[in-house]
Image (tube, rainbow, N blue to C red):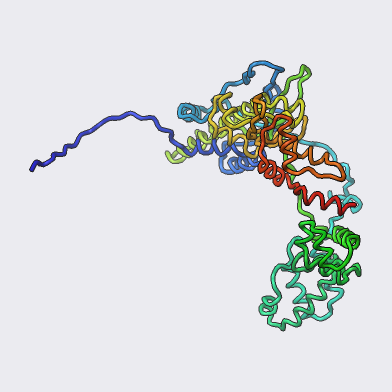
């Protein structure tokens, strides 16, 4: 038998790898933040970095705008400053090297800050507070409205305690989702007393409050109107039939004719399924555009970042120099150097983010030029790879840029993801159709239905194929469901009900 020998040796190999440093991870994270989220992120960085500060308005009047113009039919116009649009290893090394430069003390990025100096329109009293006629009244909340009724209608202190506990269990819509047994055990009282107080609370204004489900909420409102008869009770017991517009089944179970069913349905439609929202409506969060688009006089487009929502940051090198002169220990010098590197990296990352967003947005506008000129029917199929190949970036970078970003266009406010749609082949071989454009055609066909007829999915397929769209019936049904459009059977029932 032979024995295999083993030997040890040293080998030197050279390889190139991408190291995800904390700074590079920060730059990638900033790329997918919206402008408002970026402002919060920058504020947090300013709190922990003494070398960063907000740029005040009017420090630099002649700085170039963060925008790019797109001509009518040219090759892509270069940006004013060329910056790498992707986080490659070479770019990371360059940024690390550049982060050591101290700069001139006025490195900044972002939008213009608007400051107002002057006197208020409202009159002020001697204490600096607005006068009583200048004070806006605050709308009453649902809790305040119900508390006033509890204090007026319930005289027994024990009943008030039960009522206040039930009030705390209400959700924003005015529903009591939890059971009454747990309330009785928690308060140590009889279930009959809790039920008696609960019945009193269900008579409070607004009608329908303290309901445990939708059926009970509607029933309370109908009782308040003196419209809760046996036929209406049966109708509420069969709400699934009402949801499917099965008028024939409702006529059969309610024991009335179709005209009475139509009147009862009209009565139910006039009710409020969420009575609590009349006092505490949900706060609407307005969408703030990150990118602004406007038409040029010569027919092109101008793309720019929304300066009103972009943070402006300064790296205060003069303050850094003064602090450096006062440092004595090595730990203090290392901390100051690390803070300076982090501040410079943040500014460069902000500039990198702006440049990348402008490149991506400009290319989207170039490729979807027909949409902005003629509407959604001219929206062309587009995927991330098309934009990435055109501007020389990776698909993941384009995906991060288009996440949570909105662009204000002459046709409205759109998320950048809206312009990326799958393609549907054309039956005549003359290109492909955008899925969003096909959905727009389906909605247009259904909206144009005559009063006495409805289009089935098969008929819609025939009409689309006549226009050159090769689409299957199940695809039409999927798009119709996504747009919350009922089937042809349900639409026919709705039209009969309206008659």
Q: Quadrant of residue 115?
A: top right
In the depicted structure, whether residue 450 falls above or below residue 181: above
User: Residue 225 versus residue 378: which sits nearer the camera?
Assistant: 378
Q: Residue at x 71, y 47 (%)?
A: 481
How many numbered marks appear? 0
The percent position of residue 287, horizontal first and vertical second, equals 73, 41
- Residue placed at 45% from the left, 29% from the top? 89
Is 10 in front, or is 277?
A: 277
Image side of residue 42 versus residue 3, left or right? right
Q: Which corner quadrant of the image does residue 182 belong to?
A: bottom right
Residue lying at the far left of the rendered structure: 1
Residue at 79% across / 55% down in the picture?
281
Residue 26, horizontal then vertical, whole percent: 53, 38
The N terminus sits in image quarter:
top left
Please identify the quarter of the rendering in which residue 220 is found. bottom right
- Locate residue 493, reporting x and y percent: 82, 53
């Amino acid at each position: 038998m032979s024995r295999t020998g083993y030997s040890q040796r040293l080998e030197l190999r050279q390889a190139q790898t991408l190291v995800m440093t904390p700074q590079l991870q920060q730059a990638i994270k900033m790329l997918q933040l919206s402008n408002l989220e970026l402002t919060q992120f920058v504020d947090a960085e300013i709190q922990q970095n003494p070398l960063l500060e907000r740029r005040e308005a009017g420090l630099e009047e002649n700085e170039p705008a963060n925008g790019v113009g797109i001509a009518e039919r040219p090759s892509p116009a270069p940006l004013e400053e060329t910056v790498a649009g992707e986080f490659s290893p070479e770019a990371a090394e360059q940024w690390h090297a550049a982060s050591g430069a101290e700069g001139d003390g006025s490195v900044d990025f972002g939008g213009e800050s608007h400051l107002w100096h002057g006197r208020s329109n409202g009159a002020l009293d001697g204490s600096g507070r607005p006068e009583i006629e200048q004070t806006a009244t605050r709308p009453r909340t649902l809790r305040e409205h119900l508390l006033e009724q509890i204090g007026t209608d319930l005289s027994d202190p024990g009943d008030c305690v039960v009522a206040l506990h039930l009030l705390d269990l209400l959700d924003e819509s005015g529903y009591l989702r939890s059971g009454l047994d747990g309330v009785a055990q928690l308060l140590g009282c009889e279930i009959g007393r809790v039920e008696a107080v609960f019945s009193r609370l269900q008579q409070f204004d607004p009608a329908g409050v303290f309901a445990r489900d939708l059926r009970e909420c509607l029933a309370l409102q109908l009782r308040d109107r003196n419209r809760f008869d046996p036929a209406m009770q049966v109708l509420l017991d069969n709400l699934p039939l009402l949801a499917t517009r099965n008028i024939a089944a409702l006529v059969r179970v309610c024991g009335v004719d179709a005209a009475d069913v139509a009147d009862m349905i009209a009565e139910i439609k006039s009710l409020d399924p969420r009575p609590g929202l009349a006092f505490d409506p949900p706060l609407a969060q307005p969408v703030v555009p990150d990118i602004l688009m406007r038409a040029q006089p010569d027919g092109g487009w101008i793309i720019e970042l929304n300066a009103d929502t972009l943070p402006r940051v300064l790296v205060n090198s003069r303050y850094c120099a003064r602090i450096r002169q006062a440092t004595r220990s090595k730990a203090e010098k290392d901390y100051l150097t690390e803070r300076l590197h982090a501040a410079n990296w943040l500014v460069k990352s902000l500039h990198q983010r702006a440049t990348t967003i402008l490149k991506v947005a400009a290319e989207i506008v170039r490729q979807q030029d027909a949409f902005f000129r003629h509407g959604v029917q001219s929206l062309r199929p587009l995927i991330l790879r098309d934009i990435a190949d055109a501007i020389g970036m990776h698909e993941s970078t384009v995906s991060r840029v288009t996440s949570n970003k909105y662009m204000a266009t002459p046709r409205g406010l759109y998320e950048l993801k809206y312009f990326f749609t799958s393609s549907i082949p054309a039956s005549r071989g003359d290109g492909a159709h955008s899925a969003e454009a096909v959905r727009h055609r389906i909605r247009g066909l259904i909206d144009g239905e005559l009063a006495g007829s409805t289009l089935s999915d098969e008929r819609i397929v025939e009409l689309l194929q006549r226009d050159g769209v090769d689409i299957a019936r199940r695809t039409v049904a999927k798009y119709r469901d996504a747009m919350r459009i009922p089937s042809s059977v349900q639409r026919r029932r709705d039209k009969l009900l309206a008659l």
